[in-house]
Image (cartoon, coloured by chain):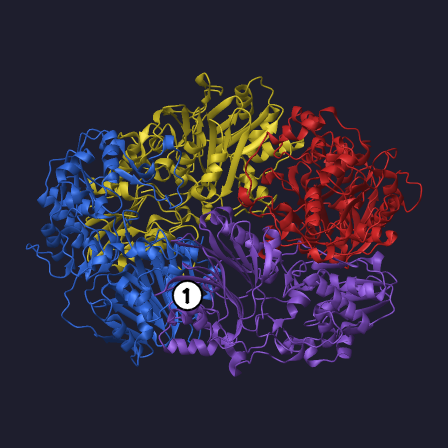
Chain colours: A blue, B yellow, C red, D purple
């Protein structure tokens, strides 16, 4: 039930303070957050004197072998999972830097929108950058910040930064967690039997037997040290909250609580609203596993059509699948999914998916269901059409690749060869999120569905990453 | 929806004849069969002159890298997946041997019950064994067989063998498939656009776009060569059919058709019968994912209780998980499964699982559901209590480890701390399998539930593997 | 001073009996014998009950990691180094087999000349071969041998075998060493403080602090068990001794004693004789390092010309050197060797090499010396022209590739662009070996120089390996 | 003849400009320079737009696989070999940094003595350091330098740096080579058929068929771009030349020309002077291979005692040797070296070594020669006693570990159990270096022998590296 491949959140982050097994707990936390970034990960610990670091590309279990984990000593630790198709090991977080304020390690979930101009300014002042990730500007801003305390330096440094950032810092002073003033990405505080934990999602707490205390609030900075948890609110209060609604739609694990709600519940309600908005006369409701299952259950419940399992997912499919030769290729979807003939044969089928990106996978799924004998195929999508990319930390394709940016619903339906296709409306989505009937939104970013970006984008934005990527381009580490 | 870790079938096998991409297709087939054995695999091909071989331990995608797969030339190929916790690379199948009849490669799914005595006899006659797998005796019997044709030699050689065996042979003469006279393990024939395929389950055919023709029949030998498919029935007809019912209960993929039935359909009917036999007043029905989902759906349907998702499975969990330190261990189940509080809170919950082996995992699941706030927990198992090990190819624990071999249902319920526990009856299981009301069985082996073994076991059986394992014990290949 | 790449002995073997560190000592012994075979190695141990095995391709230090070595328990062990450019892991020795006489492990140095016909006979009798190495026939002969004791079975089994074989067996009965009746390959017995050691060369004894006792004699079988060392002479006495003279010329380490003589001393005497036969007026004598150094020193001593270092060898060159692109290739020799201009400039140089195989390397060396400014270059070779391949265990090129098989010395000189070229005569070689003036030979095989093969070759000999190699051809293990 | 393990130069560097195979040529150059640093290496190339980078730990041939080398596009390239027992991949050079002046890559051979204070100053100004190597300060100084051209910025930046540095820079502007004003480490310019090459030693030029043009002079900066080679002399002229004499004694390859002399010639003359200063009545002169061979030849020549080979070196010994168990350990030296009894038996032996560091290896060698039957053992060392560590780029042990820092020659002799021991005098060393009779020195640093350091050391020097190493301490990359 954990999505694996539709598109990608940039990162998951975990920090532990005050536990002798800090590295082990962070490792388990990263394990639980692999759906947020599974291509590279790193852990830094501190034992009061020395920082220890392990980084690598690959799944968490491949990066950290027993021996290595044991070498990460100390009772404070932060870790980071990253989705990344390119870049050097220098880009794998946590980033570390040494400055006149000492050494600091940092893990960042989100994306900065003024990183290019900040980087240019810093370079003019003599800064030397060693990675191509936007997050590195924060390290330099902190090094140049004149505050007397780490909290002052963080507050001052971040005051120049614009964009989405949930951050963890590990320094001599303790463990610090930050959520940007808009609160785009989640970050939660939990209590361990011994010590504290900060993480992107509450599923981490369930795994390591921590108790969920609360969300870090938008614009809040928390410091965890020997005096416990101290909260700071250093940012101006005027900024609107803009939590990412797509975390509910697709990214977060359904067993997580984020933004003060159960992801599972929201998804089911998305199915409810979808069934109300887009009813259809059919024999069964099936899901595109795993991400569509909860909305499909919700849809079935309201539509009073039996839920069934019509598609099977093969979870042995890893990232290293060898694409076969030309003559037998295009196996991508079928290696992952298979249709069950005995379920679908002769049926009028509602297929619920959480979203449609390029449309190619959906098309293959419809064909697969058709080949299995379905009489009618009604595609229902539990979110609105994706019109525009995310610039706040989700690796969406370009606008050109998003099928809904240029095609009408009817055009997409034809492309999918479905008998009908309906998306959930934006209002319907917010009715589900807010559990009310108004469908109005005040706390969420839904820019990918509405093209209304709550954090202003720099003009040069679209060139940002290609510029950075030119700096260093090889040095992949196996 | 594909089970990964409860217990283990020994093997999955695939063979392709007459396709220029034979190795690639076998590779895809092994990919689809990893639930039958995921710790080692091998592929052999033949290009009319030379045999090519790749073997290794690990997941299919790790064993076969693009380059290697390309080196496996030829239009005929067989492959094998193996579950194995010990043994040398020499034990990884397909086994190959060279004799006066030429070179032959063999892949075996199942387990022989007279391998020890056969091996002893063969050794007295001068045979030299180089692996510790029971299957190797077949290579030696074939080498000593006096038949004029490969089919005669196979028929003659196998006449001495007793046990469960679905076999693939690759030789100069072509591709041969064999199913033992009892038909314990499945083996199916499919038609590719170009050429033929033999495989343990029909899900292989779906993936490589082959058309399912039929089961190889118990006791049937098929030879596929330039003349097409030829069928032989060399074994005496008196032997009773004894297809493994556990393939339906747990092993086979739900999207497969085996023993002429959809596995998905059988599993749902197991849920129906369970709901009839063991009704309970409850608020929701949840499954232990992934293997319990279909029976849970069936249960919910008959019981008219809503099906819901109460447990989430993390599919990123691989075999290399590092068990953390003593102080935070026992994470095994929670790394894989998590309970959703918002679903379970205050509910009377029916939890459907396909089977209970040692009881330890079930106990942890019950506790996890209880901790998530469930008011009542009613465990329902869609198969009868497992009383006794399998000797025909499934890696069950010893009788001592099987919780139901020594404890009553009530004792197990207490151990699980469940409010109620009920298993499906043997009759109920067969009503589901046969879609009738009698519950009588004539074609299946259910020895693990009934202790009635259809193929006589040798007395020394229990010592067999420890004897073999002493021969060679290290030499694991990474 | 240890040759690395000219051509290759097939193997080095070591066995230890009665020492608690048996595997470690065998490992060290294999380390010392890597010049005899550096592409694959294996160790088997026995702890009285269980056999332990590790095998792999690559250098000894890569195959055996600390952890693995620790897993090889027991006080008896045998090991094997192999040079091999092809073949499966099944071909890496020690070979193991299980028969009615129990399990046995075997390591073989040498080459059998009737392996093809023996294999055919054995296969007709029902034997199944699982490797493509000639040595496997011995395992089958032993399994079929009717003797009451292991020594009887070995004696009886080997009576059918013809060729070169120094063998080690590890069985329940103890450690057995065998040298073939002709004594082609060396095998020596040493005494450890605790236990005994058998090895291909005495340099093993120096490393592990064993005392050299004596050569195992041609045709001798020794058994080492709790009763100490027992000697057997099971073979007919009429066979002529034919020790490989090339072990002195090139293969053995100069610090070894084999065939009762110091290799270093023989090599220096080869230089003496060469200086007497082929004097030249020159300024300096240099060697092609490392294998030509001792003969060069001997030459310089007799010729009364100063020895100098004119060529430097880069020992960092491993097997994994990446051949650069077309435009800058042919770096092979220069990566390994470099000429010192300040030594060679304006000099008349005698270059001493131990042998010339294809002539291509020698040609490059002459050109390199010429480019460094040498005025005259006189190549002197401390062995006769190689006319014919070895069939007794050295991996010589085919006759066609041996430059001296088709070209006169003068033609070779022109090809090398040397000012003069002279080889040592066969008589000169034997004067050096026997320290006398006659030059007559009675104990050595010099077939590669004389084309007189002391062990008759089967007619089909030349097809032998290609036949075997067709059986299995991929499955290389990293 | 290339030393491998006595102690370690920090680095070797190679740069190529204007050749389409730049990365391949740099790779070959690094291959030739592995004696200067064999534990990590990196290559950076530039194709006019993009920088490409590969780094890794291990031997050159292990770091760069064919595929990777091909990915390093462009006609300009620099590479670096490093000896290092600790540190993160971030410490592997070439270092890269991006600043307002663009991206630059840098490779450094040598060691800075004011890196700690410079780093502190830079950090106060806001610099963020990401490695723990002293060289990184140079990147920051350049980024802060206000010069208009790269040469001005390099000149200005380096004006603050004190210590030993031969540097290569790769930037948009071209390839830059720098040798510090003292000229401690070598750096030479060569001409390729197409393009230019800069390297630490001339052996690189021999390998890639470049012509040696000249040394880069102390204090010289050369820029190579489309206008050819331009020379700059930006540093004050008053600084004394202080070339490392130990490059002649031990480090450089004997086939190299550095500091305008053949290393081979200097070494032989060291032997001459040693024979004059420390004559002895003996039967043979042997070398400790490989580094002592040339001095031994020189000694033998002057002493008129025959040179012989008494110790054999096993070149298969790699870095991964497994130290056996306690009971059989201390094999270190014997795995590498073995004595030849037939040469040494009954002889009075002069053993020539290039230097003695801790004395432990020498002691084992003397014992080994004694055990081989030598009657007398006279150790002669072709350099003076090492009294003090190097702070300019050689990884010498601490003063406490240097046997000659606290013990007299007679005490060392006793420790070695040699019959006599004599070192070359400092004057004798300089007579050999200058080919004259005065023994006076004006161009070389001999601080390790004389304790007179030509570049002033900071007081805190001894704490420098431990300070740095605390910053980051794990993250080793396999």
Observer-nearest of C251 and D170: D170
In the image, C207: left or right of B453? right
**Toward which corner of the image does residue D381 lie, by quadrant?**
bottom right
Residue B280 in view (yes/no): no
**Toward which corner of the image does residue A245 lie, by quadrant?**
bottom left
Label 1, on which residue?
A: D150
Residue A363 in view (yes/no): yes
Q: Quadrant of the C terminus of chain C?
A: top right
Observer-nearest of B240 and A343: A343
- Counting from the top left corner in percent of width and height, residue C390 is at 75, 35
Q: Tell me which residue sits at (71%, 73%) in the image.
A: D430
Residue situated furthest left in the rendering = A438
**Toward which corner of the image does residue C235 lie, by quadrant?**
top right
In the image, D51: left or right of C41? left
Observer-nearest of C100 and C89: C89
C27, above or below C87, in the image: below
Subunit that carries the residue with mark 1: D
In the image, A184: left or right of A432? right
- Counting from the top left corner in percent of width and height, residue D91 is at 47, 65
- Counting from the top left corner in percent of width and height, residue B477 is at 54, 46
B274, above or below A367, in the image: below
Q: What element carries label 1?
A: helix
Observer-nearest of B66 and D200: D200
- Counting from the top left corner in percent of width and height, residue C382 is at 81, 45
Q: How crowded is the residue under tag 1: few (<14 C-alpha within 10 Å), some, or many (20+)?
A: many
Residue situated furthest right in the rendering = C437
In this rendering, the count of numbered labels is 1
Q: Tell me which residue sits at (52%, 81%) in the image.
A: D458
D124, above or below D103, in the image: below
């Amino acid at each position: 039930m954990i999505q694996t491949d539709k598109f990608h959140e940039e990162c998951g982050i975990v920090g532990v303070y005050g536990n002798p097994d800090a590295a082990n707990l962070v490792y388990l936390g990263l394990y639980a957050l692999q759906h947020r970034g599974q291509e590279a990960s790193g852990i830094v610990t501190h034992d009061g004197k020395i920082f220890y670091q392990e980084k690598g590309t690959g799944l968490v279990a491949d990066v950290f072998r027993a021996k290595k984990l044991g070498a990460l000593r100390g009772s404070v630790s932060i870790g980071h999972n990253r989705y990344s198709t390119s870049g050097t090991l220098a880009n794998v977080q946590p980033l570390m830097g040494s400055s006149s304020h000492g050494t600091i390690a940092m893990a960042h979930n989100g994306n900065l929108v003024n990183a290019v101009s900040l980087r240019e300014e810093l370079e003019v002042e003599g800064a030397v950058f060693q990675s191509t990730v936007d997050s590195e500007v924060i390290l330099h801003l902190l090094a140049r910040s004149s505050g007397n305390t780490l909290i002052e330096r963080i507050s001052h440094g971040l005051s120049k930064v614009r964009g989405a950032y949930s951050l963890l810092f590990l320094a001599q002073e303790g463990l610090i967690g930050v959520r940007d003033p808009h609160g785009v990405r989640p970050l939660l505080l939990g209590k361990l039997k011994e010590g504290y934990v900060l993480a992107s999602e509450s599923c981490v707490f369930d795994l390591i037997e921590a108790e969920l205390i609360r969300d870090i609030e938008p614009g809040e900075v928390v410091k965890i040290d020997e005096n416990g948890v101290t909260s700071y609110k250093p940012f101006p209060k005027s900024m609107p909250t803009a939590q990412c609604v797509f975390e509910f739609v697709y990214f977060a694990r359904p067993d997580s609580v984020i933004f003060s709600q159960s992801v599972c519940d929201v998804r089911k309600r998305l199915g409810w609203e979808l069934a109300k908005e887009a009813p259809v006369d059919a024999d069964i409701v099936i899901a595109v596993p795993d991400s569509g299952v909860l909305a499909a259950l919700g849809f079935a419940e309201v539509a009073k059509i039996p839920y069934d399992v019509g598609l099977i997912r093969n979870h042995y499919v890893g990232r290293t699948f060898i694409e076969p030769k030309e003559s037998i290729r295009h196996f991508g979807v079928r290696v992952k999914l298979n249709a069950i003939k005995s379920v679908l044969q002769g049926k009028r089928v509602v297929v619920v998916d959480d979203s449609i990106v390029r449309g190619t996978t959906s098309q293959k799924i419809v064909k697969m269901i058709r080949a299995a004998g379905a009489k009618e195929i009604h595609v229902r999508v539990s979110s609105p059409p994706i019109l525009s990319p995310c610039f706040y930390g989700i690796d969406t394709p370009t606008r050109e690749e998003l099928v809904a940016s240029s095609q009408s619903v009817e055009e997409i339906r034809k492309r999918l060869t479905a008998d009908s296709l309906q998306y959930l409306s934006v209002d319907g989505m917010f009715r589900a999120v807010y559990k009310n009937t108004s469908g109005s939104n005040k706390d969420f970013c839904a820019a990918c569905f509405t093209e209304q970006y709550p954090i202003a984008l720099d003009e040069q934005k679209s060139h940002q990453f290609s510029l950075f990527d030119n700096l260093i381009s090889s040095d992949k580490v196996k």
